[in-house]
């Protein structure tokens, strides 16, 4: 109907429920996008945390650390050979020692009763040691593992990765498996990279004389 004054009749306002229904799809889409973003972020964080845990503390092997060890060895294998030969001289100088540990600064021999006798590394030993690609190595001999010399990274986060010299061992994989190492990689004849021992107790047993 047209009012008597000739003006068109005003449209009746939409009910308030209609306005809520018009806004509801937009709100639902926003909430759904927010949920998807939160789920994606949580999944990414969980994946990164699990990957780091698996590589460093779990049963996995950090191939990047093995690659770094191999690169360091290949840079100057003669430095490792000279250090291994010097360790055999130290073994002869300390007969009966359960363990001999050599760093850039010290040479320590442990007796069967657990007593340590340490002395400053001489200039010649320091010069030999300094040729290794990283001075964070601990060069070690253990009486329980005759004929083997271990080059360990003792300043890096656990677990430990090791370069092993064992010229008389024709089957280093068996040694790695028996001692709980999760990986091994052959270098030159007599030289092997050993992956981590994830179990803390077994690693302590492996590293103690």
Image (cartoon, rainbow, N blue to C red):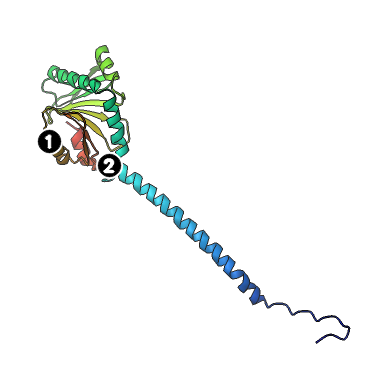
- From mark 1 to mark 2, how far is it between C-alphas? 21 Å
Q: Residue at x 21, y 19 (%)?
A: 82
Residue 204 falls left or right of residue 174:
right
Q: Quadrant of the C terminus?
A: top left
* Label 2 crowd bin: few (<14), some (14–19), many (20+), radius 10 Å: many
Extreme residue toward the top, this view:
123
Residue 117 is at least partly visible in this image: no
In the image, residue 120 above or below residue 195? above
Marker disc for residue 171: 1
Marker disc for residue 149: none
The image shows a total of numbered marks equal to: 2
Q: Quadrant of residue 170?
A: top left
Give the x, y percent position of residue 58: 28, 45
Q: Residue at x 42, y 51 (%)?
A: 44
Q: Point out the tag, 1 or 2, that comes first from the N-terminus.
A: 2
Residue 39 falls left or right of residue 183:
right
Residue 59 falls left or right of residue 91:
right
Marker disc for residue 61: 2
Which of discs 1 and 2 lies nearer the camera? The answer is: 1
* Label 1 crowd bin: few (<14), some (14–19), many (20+), radius 10 Å: few
Residue 36 is at least partly visible in this image: yes
Give the x, y percent position of residue 52: 35, 44
Residue 43 falls left or right of residue 69:
right
In the image, residue 40 above or below residue 127? below
Q: Is the Cβ of the residue at disc 1 closer than 8 Å to that at disc 2? A: no
Extreme residue toward the right, this view:
5
Q: Quadrant of residue 18?
A: bottom right
Please tell me whether mark 1 sits on a helix, a strand or a loop.
loop
């Amino acid at each position: 109907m047209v009012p008597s004054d000739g003006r068109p009749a005003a449209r009746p306002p939409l009910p308030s429920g209609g306005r809520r229904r018009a806004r509801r799809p937009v709100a639902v889409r926003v909430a759904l996008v927010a949920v998807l973003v939160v789920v994606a972020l949580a999944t990414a964080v969980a994946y990164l945390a699990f990957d780091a845990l698996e590589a460093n503390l779990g049963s996995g092997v950090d191939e990047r650390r093995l690659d770094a060890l191999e690169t360091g060895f290949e840079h100057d294998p003669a430095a490792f050979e000279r250090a291994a030969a010097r360790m055999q001289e130290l073994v002869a100088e300390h007969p009966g020692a359960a363990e001999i540990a050599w760093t850039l600064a010290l040479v320590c021999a442990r007796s069967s009763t657990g007593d340590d006798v340490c002395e400053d590394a001489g200039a010649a030993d320091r010069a030999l040691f300094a040729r290794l690609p990283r001075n964070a190595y601990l060069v070690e001999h253990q009486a329980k593992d005759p004929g083997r010399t271990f080059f360990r990274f003792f300043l890096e986060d656990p677990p430990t990765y090791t370069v092993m010299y064992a010229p008389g061992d024709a089957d280093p994989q068996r040694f790695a498996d028996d001692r709980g190492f999760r990986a091994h990689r052959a270098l030159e004849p007599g030289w092997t990279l050993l992956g981590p021992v994830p179990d803390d107790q077994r690693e302590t047993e492996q590293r103690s004389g």
